[in-house]
Image (cartoon, rainbow, N blue to C red):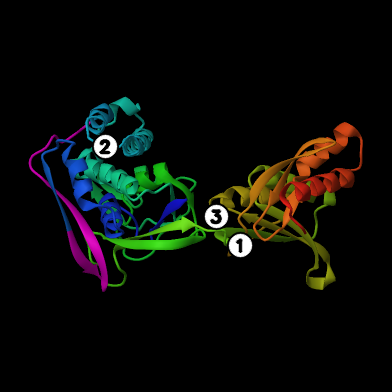
Amino acid sequence: MKICYFDSFSGISGDMTVGALIDAGADWNALESALQSLNLEAKFRIEKTKRKGIAASKFSVEFGEQKKHRHLPHIEKIILGGDLSEHARQNALAVFRRLGEAEAKSHNVPIEKVHFHEVGAVDSICDIVGACVALDLLGIEEVRSSRINVGSGTVNTEHGVLPVPTPATAELLKDRPVYASGPETELTTPTGAALMAALASGFGSLPPVRILAQGFGAGDKDFPMQANVLRVLIGERTNATESTAVSMVEANIDDSTPQVLGYAMERLFEAGALDVTLTPIFMKKNRPATLISVMTRPDLVDELAAILFAETSTLGVRVLQAERRVLAREIAQVETPYGKIRVKYTDNNSFAPEYDDCLQAAKAHKVALRTVMAEAGEAFRRQTNHSK
């Protein structure tokens, strides 16, 4: 699988996205032809520049007097009329739909009545369509993103001075990992946020890939302390261990009963925790206690911390950033005397029957759980010639 990883260490905008994808090898002539087919009477330019010594491509759109406001149906009509591949067309429509939903919620109006201001301008239409066409030209099958640097401070918009991230950008990146670092300015625009919200299948560390190409797209400003560029990495998936960013939420508890801690564990798993462990420890004054450790995606930290405060007696939690390494796994299904059982396996000859399947089969056939697991393991060995 060919993937594109967006490294948004200095934010992301539409023009930076197009520039980075062209820099990574997207065919400029084919991209320009697709944009010209939108009939927006615009001209397009790609030029090499530098940001803090990093060579990058700057994508620009030039146009004359244009309609100031556009509604979503008008923009969709423009995209539908362009000479685009069906995949690029559907992606562009999905991005604008997501953008419209965020604007509608931010202004508390129906999506049909949303006036697209900055994002309805010709350059924003071309940025979004251009990004989707470029991804298609590169043969990208999956989009992934790093944590996104949104910036800070304020920005001047059609609605006046707004905080960074703007309401639309914050809505688009809801439940996704973001942070603010660097100059007090808008680093991530609504257009850039919409592209990632609609197209990215995951956010976090770079997945295991064999890197084929990289590209840098330049932003308008040249900051004194950091390169104002967006980097993309184009690669093919590998079976190496996958490194993902996780958070650990921990608390030391010396006055909760086992029943309370057990129920808290259940609630944490139900809310999306990746793992929860209870470890016996000794605290100050030699008090026996329990360390509860919760592994989670970064975007769920607040929700899971709230569960710990609600369900246990702790008055504080620790939040640590960590990295999780996971072997690439596949699922096979085997036939046993107790029915079909799924088995997880990896390329290094490690495998394990799916616990839930084995438990359900053991209950249904009134046999020992270990009997079902043994049968599933043996069936998998016969089916695949694995050894453990």
Q: Tell me what residue is drawn at x 88 percent, y 47 percent.
A: 370
Which residue bears the numbered disc 1?
Answer: 325
Q: Check whether the beta carbons of the residues at disc 2 and disc 3 lie within 8 A of each other.
A: no
Give me the C-alpha separation between circle 2 and circle 1: 39 Å
Give me the C-alpha separation between circle 2 and circle 3: 37 Å
Residue 317 shows in the view: no
Give me the C-alpha separation between circle 1 and circle 3: 15 Å
Q: Secondary structure at mark 1?
A: strand
Left or right of 387? Residue 61 is left
Q: Tell me what residue is drawn at x 41 percent, y 44 percent.
A: 199
For the record, the magenta segment spans: 47-70
Left or right of 315? Residue 174 is left
The numbered mark at residue 84 is 2
Which residue type carries mark 3? Answer: Pro
Q: Position of residue 342 (x, y in %)?
A: 72, 42
The numbered mark at residue 6 is none
Q: Tell me what residue is drawn at x 86 percent, y 32 percent.
A: 364
Which residue bears the numbered disc 3?
Answer: 298
Q: Tell me what residue is drawn at x 30 percent, y 55 percent.
A: 21
